[in-house]
Amino acid sequence: MASNKRGMHGIWGSRWTFILAATGSAVGLGNIWKFPYITGENGGGAFVLMYLVCILVAGVPVMIAEVLLGRRGRMSPIHTMQAEAKEQQAPAVFSGIGWMGAVSGFFILSFYSVIAGWTLAYIGKMASGEFSGADADTAAASFSGLLADPWTLLGLHTLFMIMTGGVIARGVKHGLEDGVRLLMPLLFVMLIMLLGYAITTPGFVQGWNFLFSFDASKLNADSIVVALGHSFFTLSLGMGAIMTYGAYMPAEASLTRTIFTVAFLDTLVALVAGLIIFPIVFSNGLEPAAGPGLMFQTLPIAFGALPGGTLIGTAFFVLVAIAAWSSAISIAEPAVAWAVEKGVSRGRATFIVCLLAWLIGVGTVLSFNEWSEVTFLKGTFFDNLDFLTSNLMMPLGGMAIAIFVGWYMRREDAEGELNVADHRVFTVWRFMLRYLSPLAILLIFVKGLS
Ligand code: TRP
């Protein structure tokens, strides 16, 4: 039987609420902004294939493990991992998984909010009709103009952080549920519409081939690390966000089916975003390896060319901002939940968490202008933060979770919590968690960092 413990933070209304919230967490800038641009930087098809393999071999099994831990513990990741490590008599390092997650959460939230700020700017740019009939040069100039202006970026970053804090302070359940229920389907519809446009562009076949034709010679160790890191980033894994949402999950809901649904929706959105952006890239003679600005320089061209594009474009960026919003909330929630368990009021905890992340975010704001020449290790301040969290801390957290649930958690505890009717599903999953997932992560680390 799944454990019947109840936490202090409340329980989602139903399995579907969890699916919506987890999908709200998973689908965000990672899918629409980051996936296309890192695919572009890493040469296309071979990278996409690696990413899909990583989702299946590491992402899904670890996601199940993470939600399982959350639902057993019914607390913030820090407290859940402390309690679970003790209960399962695992080495003390495992009780630190929650702490590492909290630290990476601050880092991720700090840059996530800055990029989400760009989408807020684009709502305004779209609505003003700036892009009607715009060509690639106009779109590029508009984007670089935005990045060159630290005060505007700082204002947008601040606004987004206040939006995020506003929902969290009210409690995740009430703030989030209604929002995602309405808006996620709308985002889907909008993506399909844009896909319809992309299909009519002359670059569609080239875009399709770029995404789906496998060229092994383009694979290098670095791009494999990026693929692994992104599979964790996009599923919100390895730092406790999904564990926290699992802590609010009803005891009777099936974990495996639920998680497959979330992972499928998340992957679908990423692939569709790629199928929209790359045809536009090729049709307009743009560079697929343009980097973080890729989405902001391609989509305005599409909207500028579409009848009614001003309206549709505005609505689209509203939806992307909302997708980012529902993700940002899940990044901040673990730290806030921990502070609440420590007796701090929810409002005050939210304020402190958001303020800290906001401060670190200033470094990312400056990475695109004043500090753009200040590079070390992997590049700018932002590049390093992104690399550290996505490519090191999250996979490391994921590996620790896999090893803990696979090797240290008693078999009957894991099976009881997973609660699958079909015993074979459990056996396959546990095998992957014990061997395949940690080994894959380890191999990628060793290869990527040597
Ligand atoms: N998955 C989200 C996206 O793809 C981002 C995100 C939400 C996240 N919660 C997270 C990333 C926790 C890392 C950890 O946009």
Image (cartoon, grey):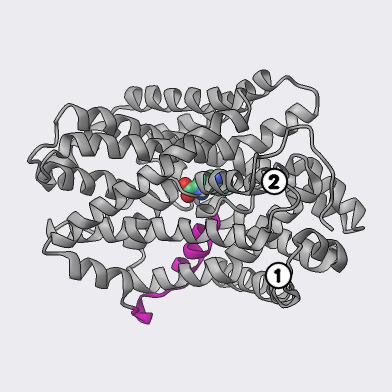
Q: Amino acid at mark 1?
A: Leu
Q: Which mark is residue 433?
A: 1
Residue at x 16% of width, y 39% of height: 309
Snapshot quadrant of residue 338: top right
Visible residue check, residue 256: yes
Q: Residue furthest bottom?
A: 216
**Viewer-proximal residue, 108 or 151?**
108
Cα separation, mark 2 vs mark 1, equals 22 Å
The quarter of the picture where the N terminus appears is bottom right
Residue at x 55% of width, y 28% of height: 175
Image coords of residue 273 (percent x, y): 33, 55
Q: Which residues are magenta?
A: 214-232
Visible residue check, residue 384: no
Image coords of residue 103 (percent x, y): 65, 41
Snapshot quadrant of residue 306: top left
Q: Amino acid at mark 2?
A: Met
**Viewer-proximal residue, 312 or 353?**
312
- Neighbor class of circle 2 (other Cα within 10 Å; few <14, some 14-19, many 20+) is many
Q: Which residue does the numbered mark 2 point to in the structure image?
A: 249
